[in-house]
Amino acid sequence: MAAVPTTQQFFAGEKVTASKLTAATKTPIDFLMNPPRANVYPANPAPVPTGSSVLIPFDGEQWDTDSMHSTTVNPSRITINTSGQYLVSIYARYPVHATGYRQLNLRLNSGGSSSAGSTLTTINVAAVAGTSTFITRTFELSCTAGDHYELFTLQTSGTTLNLDIGQRVTGMEFRWLSTT
């Protein structure tokens, strides 16, 4: 868990020491230059049957600076270790298929169930004829250490579709911005 550095205060007449100057400047700057963040994506095919809400497994990571994700234990989750305000991005791309709609649903503490926990945001998009259907949403969210977030998808094409996979194609990103 990354600890948000506390600010240091200097008092009139106080002798400036290397350790206090480091605590006052370098430590907070180092934290801000590499804040808690994770970017995860499915690296292997992710089939989504028609009409069923499916938990997206994220077996690939672009980065994870605060041990927020595991590719082997609960790979669908991002777990917050450092409380604060986060910039959250969720996105998915479906292959060309003109029928039905596509949906993303971000849930808090759902334990892998599309009906448990709390829905934080849901996006529905009609399928696009002749091209891939891309769904995306970015927003700020106040997050508490210990909470986990999972992304579910649903599609109604009438057949099973595989999500397009890979970095910046289908995935989730959480980036620490500030204390709340």
Image (tube, grey):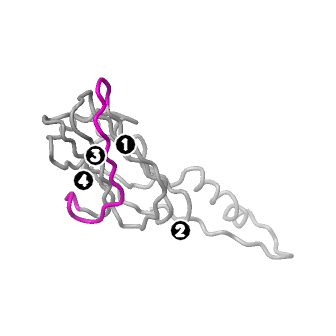
Name the residue nearer the viewer: 14 or 174. Answer: 174
Give the foreground label among 4 and 1. 1
CA–CA distance in space, label 2 to label 1: 25 Å
- Comparing 124 with 1, the one in front is 124
Provide the secondary structure element on which disc 4 rests: loop
In whole angstroms, how far apart are the C-alphas of marks 4 and 1?
A: 22 Å
Mark on residue 91? 1
- Measure how far apart labels 3 and 4 are at the Cα level: 25 Å
The image quadrant of residue 20 is bottom right
Residue placed under numbered mark 3 in the picture? 103
Question: How far across and how far down the image is residue 83, in percent?
Answer: 46, 66
**Mark 3, residues whose alpha carbon is within 10 Å: few (<14), some, or many (≥20)?**
some
Does residue 37 appear to the left or right of 157 in the view shown? right
Amino acid at pointer 1: Tyr
Observer-side mark, 3 or 4, equals 3
Residue under label 4, please give it. 73
Of pointers 1 and 3, the one earlier in the residue sequence: 1
Q: At 39% from the left edge and 43% from the top edge, which residue is drawn?
A: 136
Question: Between 80 and 20, which is closer to the camera in this rendering?
Answer: 80
Could you tell which of marks 3 and 2 lies nearer the N-terminus? Answer: 3
